């Protein structure tokens, strides 16, 4: 699947440079209206659309008359607060004539790192999409300090695409794709039409193509491609500055397509393996055998539980001699797990006092062995 027309759910990232005049004089209104017309076309075809838009800092900076040079954190936070309200209104006003309702969703890195908050923001986005709304997502720059920032919206957009299970992520950029080298330094550089695997060579091509306004360069775009494609989502980098930038994709304008990994289950396992474990579950020899046959981990085979974890959080699975077998997402909290250690499935309900699922870690939620990105 490569064409825009085939995607069911599309996340579009809009960089600051496309939307905000370089001298901070305001929004590029005509361009925004042409984007809104494209979004209306996609919605009319029954496609879900999420917009991840930068521009709050660039807009607010102009309004407040702050310098175009690097801003201190407090200055960018103030600029974001002033700019975001205008940004959201601009999208609302551009999409309303098409009878499209917009919603503002502001997130920080913690919203995807913390499982409970991640599930919460996923449920909200899902609800908005099911109501036909177009969410306008940005980082909550006003409260995000350096430690809890995404910092660039390429990364944020990839995370949003994974969160909502999008099948296509479009990064509207100031370049029309990934080149073999930076075309500004290397006139002989050529654009890649399709990337099926993100190899170290591909990563080396990314260099840095950042512009004055946006945080990301080609490097963050290739990182975004890694996140998206490994979760089964195609990603396109294309020139965003032309009018109707989305419909241009269907017309075969130049772009680079990063194709989604064909085995989303393997990708999911890599994702599980990459998470920071919140606890440890020790299992007996019988359970090790069962796991090696691809079975789920039942409480009966567990000898010890340590750590403090909630349902759905990653835990390390180790054998009694301490060998790390892999990790998985637990279906019980650490307190529940401690209560049912060693219990047969039939006894779990009596031990907990309420009905519960038998598997402590389901085989679909488990990554055994070593996985590398
Ligand atoms: N969140 C920032 C803003 O809206 C932009 C980050 C980026 O340029 O990627 O101004």
Image: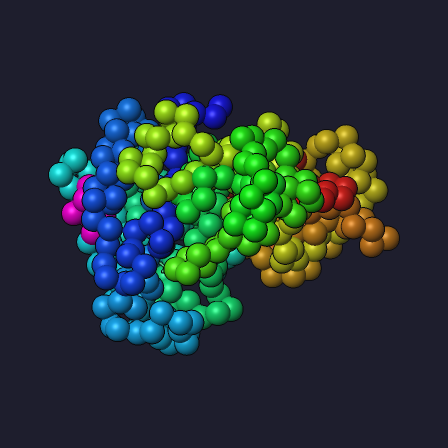
Q: Which residue lies most toward the right here?
A: 321
Residue 54 at what x, y percent from top left?
Answer: 36, 54
Which is the main secondary structure of the residues drawn in magenta?
helix
Q: Is residue 105 above or below residue 228?
A: below
* Left or right: residue 251 compared with residue 220: left
Toward which corner of the image does residue 276 lie, by quadrant? Answer: bottom right
Which residues are drawn in magenta? Answer: 90-95
Q: Which residue is drawn at 42% across and 67% down?
A: 144
The quadrant of the picture occupied by the C terminus is: top right
Q: Is residue 160 visible?
A: no
Q: Is residue 292 visible?
A: yes
Residue 305 at what x, y percent from top left?
Answer: 69, 56
Q: Which residue is drawn at 37% across and 61% down?
A: 140
Magenta stretch encompasses residue 241: no
Residue 359 at what x, y percent from top left?
Answer: 62, 39
Toward which corner of the image does residue 64 lie, by quadrant? Answer: bottom left
Q: How many marks?
A: 0
* Left or right: residue 174 compared with residue 321: left
Observer-nearest residue: 296 or 69?
69
Q: Which residue is drawn at 41% across and 25% down?
A: 252
> Quarter containing ligand 1?
bottom left
Residue 316 at what x, y percent from top left?
Answer: 70, 52
């Amino acid at each position: 699947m490569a064409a825009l027309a085939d995607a069911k759910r599309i996340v579009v990232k809009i960089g600051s440079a496309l939307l905000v005049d370089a001298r901070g004089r305001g929004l590029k209104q005509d361009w925004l209206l042409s984007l809104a017309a494209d979004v209306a076309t996609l919605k009319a075809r029954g496609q879900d659309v999420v917009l991840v838009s930068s521009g709050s800092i660039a807009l607010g900076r102009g309004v407040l008359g702050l310098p175009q040079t690097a801003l201190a954190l407090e200055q960018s936070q103030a600029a974001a607060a002033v700019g975001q309200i205008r940004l959201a209104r601009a999208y609302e006003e551009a999409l309303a004539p098409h009878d499209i309702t917009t919603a503002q969703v502001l997130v920080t890195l913690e919203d995807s790192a913390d499982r409970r908050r991640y599930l919460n923001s996923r449920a909200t986005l899902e609800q908005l999409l099911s109501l036909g709304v177009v969410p306008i997502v940005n980082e909550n720059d006003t409260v995000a300090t350096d430690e809890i920032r995404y910092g660039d919206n390429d990364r944020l957009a990839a995370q949003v695409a994974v969160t909502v299970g999008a099948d296509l992520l479009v990064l509207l950029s100031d370049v029309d794709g990934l080149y073999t080298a930076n075309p500004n330094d290397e006139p002989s550089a050529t654009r890649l039409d399709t990337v099926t695997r993100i190899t170290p060579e591909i990563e080396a091509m990314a260099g840095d193509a950042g512009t004055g306004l946006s945080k990301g360069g080609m490097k963050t775009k290739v990182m975004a491609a890694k996140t998206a494609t490994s979760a089964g989502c195609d990603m396109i980098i294309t020139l965003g500055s032309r009018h109707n930038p989305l419909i241009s994709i269907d017309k075969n304008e130049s772009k680079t397509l990063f194709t989604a990994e064909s085995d989303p289950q393997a990708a999911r396992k890599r994702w599980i393996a990459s998470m920071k474990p919140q606890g440890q579950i020790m299992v007996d020899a019988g359970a090790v055998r069962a796991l090696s046959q691809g079975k789920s981990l039942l409480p009966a085979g567990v000898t010890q539980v340590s750590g403090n974890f909630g349902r759905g959080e990653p835990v390390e699975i180790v054998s009694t001699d301490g060998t790390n077998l892999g990790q998985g997402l637990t279906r019980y909290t650490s307190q529940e797990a401690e209560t049912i250690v060693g219990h047969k499935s039939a006894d779990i309900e009596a031990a907990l006092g309420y009905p519960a699922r038998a598997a402590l870690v389901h085989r679909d939620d488990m990554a055994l062995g070593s996985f590398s990105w």
